[in-house]
Structures are given as structure tokens and as C-alpha cells.
Image (tube, rainbow, N blue to C red):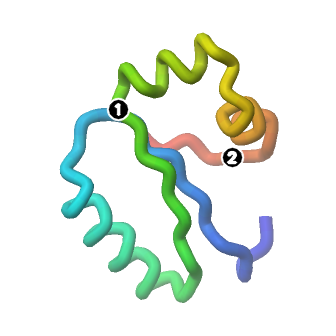
Amino acid sequence: MSDESDIDILVVGSFKTTELQKVLLEVQKLSGREINSVELLNNEFNKKMEEKDELLIYIFSKEHIKII
């Protein structure tokens, strides 16, 4: 991972989209890096995992950092 590359983030769970976007915008400003996000509710994530969604397969096949 490059210190200059975009940050791609997958957010799974219950959250208010507007609040999440505010937090991500602040992190983007502090880091000086663009943040791209994909947001899924728990049931959406589980369904996509069961269906072997190509995006999720791609995400989990690459180097990543898990934040809980």
C-alpha cells in the first residue's frame, strides 16, 4: 500500500449515512488522501457473501486492514 494512494473502505453494519460521510470527509482532510467507500447493511453484506459477489471477493483477496 502506498502512502499516496486512495483509501478504499468497506463499511458494514447499521449507521447513518450522513454521519458516516461526515467522519470520512474529516479523515480525508486529515490524511490528505481521497477516501472511496462502499456501505452495506449487515443483511446486504451477508447476501452478497453468499452470492460470492465479485467486488467482495476482490476486496478480501487483496491486502487489507480490518477495523472494528
Query: Which image quadrant for residue 33?
Result: bottom right
- Estimate how packed mark 1 is, as few (under 14), some (14 to 19) or many (20 or more) residues with alpha carbons within 10 Å: few
**Which residue carries the number 1 mark?**
41
- Estimate how packed mark 2 is, as few (under 14), some (14 to 19) or many (20 or more) residues with alpha carbons within 10 Å: few
Q: Which mark is residue 31?
A: none
Q: Helix, strand or loop at disc 1? A: loop
Residue shown at 70% from the left, 41% from the top:
59
Q: Which mark is residue 64?
A: 2
Mark 2–mark 1 distance (CA, rounded to whole Å): 20 Å
Q: Position of residue 31 (x, y in %)?
A: 51, 82
Q: Position of residue 30 (x, y in %)?
A: 43, 85
Q: Position of residue 48 (x, y in %)?
A: 56, 23
Instruction: Locate the C terminus and report the quarter of the image it occupies.
Output: top left
Q: Earlier in the sequence, mark 2 or mark 1?
A: 1
Q: Is residue 13 above or below residue 22?
A: above
Q: Nearer the viewer, residue 50 or 19?
A: 50
Given the image, on which type of amino acid does mark 2 rest? His
Q: Nearer the viewer, residue 2 or 58?
A: 58
Residue shown at 35% from the left, 32% from the top:
41
Residue shown at 79% from the left, 64% from the top:
1
Residue shown at 55% from the left, 65% from the top:
36
Q: Nearer the viewer, residue 67 or 62?
A: 62
Q: How many marks?
A: 2
Given the image, on which type of amino acid does mark 1 rest? Leu
Q: Helix, strand or loop at disc 2? A: loop
